[in-house]
Image (cartoon, helix red, strand yellow):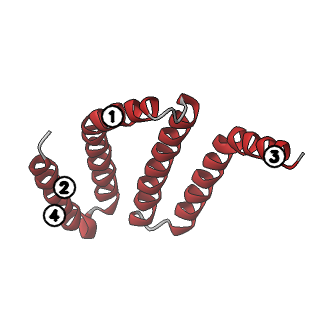
């Protein structure tokens, strides 16, 4: 995937969105959403080698597959939350964006609860 294609698509969509925003704001929001979804699919495709390299590194350094998967899932949740919140802000829905961010933070915390439990049990055993 070429970064140039992503840049050209993003700039073209941004120009179209600016032109549409005054006359048809609802279509501008839909175009923005479609552009972001398309760009996300391209980025996910481009991130595949990075994710595979991270998996290999976690196995190589005995980081643990569970912790490595947890890290990758948390990273994915953070990225999706940020993009969703930015889309809500672009649509003029700041309150909705804040709630999306709160939901993302809560999801990451829920995802990490087993790791917190392991850390606390390890600390308790060290104290004994």
Of marks 4 and 2, which one's residue comes earlier in the chain? 2
Task: Please tell me whether mark 1 sits on a helix, a strand or a loop.
Answer: helix
Of marks 1 and 4, which one's residue comes earlier in the chain? 4
- Horizontally, residue 4 falls left or right of residue 89, namely left
Mark 2: few/some/many CA within 10 Å (<14, 14-19, 20+) = some
Q: Are marks 1 and 3 in contact (CB under 8 Å)?
A: no
Q: Nearer the viewer, residue 92 or 39?
A: 39
- Horizontally, residue 11 falls left or right of residue 25, namely left
Task: Please tell me whether mark 4 sits on a helix, a strand or a loop.
Answer: helix
Q: CA distance from mark 1 to mark 3?
A: 34 Å
Tell me the tag on residue 10: 2
Q: Are marks 4 and 2 in contact (CB under 8 Å)?
A: no
Of marks 1 and 2, which one's residue comes earlier in the chain? 2
Q: Position of residue 64 (x, y in %)?
A: 55, 32
Q: In the orientation shown, which residue stands out farthest toward the right?
A: 128
Q: CA distance from mark 1 to mark 4?
A: 36 Å
Task: Please tell me whether mark 3 sits on a helix, a strand or a loop.
Answer: helix
Q: Are marks 2 and 3 in contact (CB under 8 Å)?
A: no
Q: CA distance from mark 4 to mark 3?
A: 60 Å
Mark 4: few/some/many CA within 10 Å (<14, 14-19, 20+) = few
Of marks 2 and 3, which one's residue comes earlier in the chain? 2
Q: Nearer the viewer, mark 1 or mark 3?
A: 3
Q: Which residue is mark 4?
A: 15
Relative to 122, residue 104 above or below:
below
Q: Quadrant of residue 91?
A: bottom left
Q: Quadrant of residue 19?
A: bottom left
Q: Which residue is mark 3?
A: 126
Q: Which residue is mark 1?
A: 53
Q: CA distance from mark 1 to mark 2?
A: 28 Å
């Amino acid at each position: 995937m070429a970064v140039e294609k992503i840049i050209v698509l993003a700039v073209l969509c941004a120009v179209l969105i600016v032109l549409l925003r005054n006359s048809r704001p609802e279509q501008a929001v839909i175009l923005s959403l479609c552009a972001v979804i398309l760009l996300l699919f391209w980025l996910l495709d481009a991130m595949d080698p990075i994710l595979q390299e991270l998996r290999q590194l976690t196995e190589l350094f005995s980081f643990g597959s569970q912790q490595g998967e947890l890290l990758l899932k948390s990273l994915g949740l953070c990225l999706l939350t940020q993009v969703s919140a930015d889309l809500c802000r672009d649509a003029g829905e700041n309150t909705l964006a804040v709630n999306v961010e709160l939901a993302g933070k809560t999801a990451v915390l829920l995802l990490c609860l087993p790791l917190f439990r392991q850390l606390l049990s390890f600390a308790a055993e060290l104290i004994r």
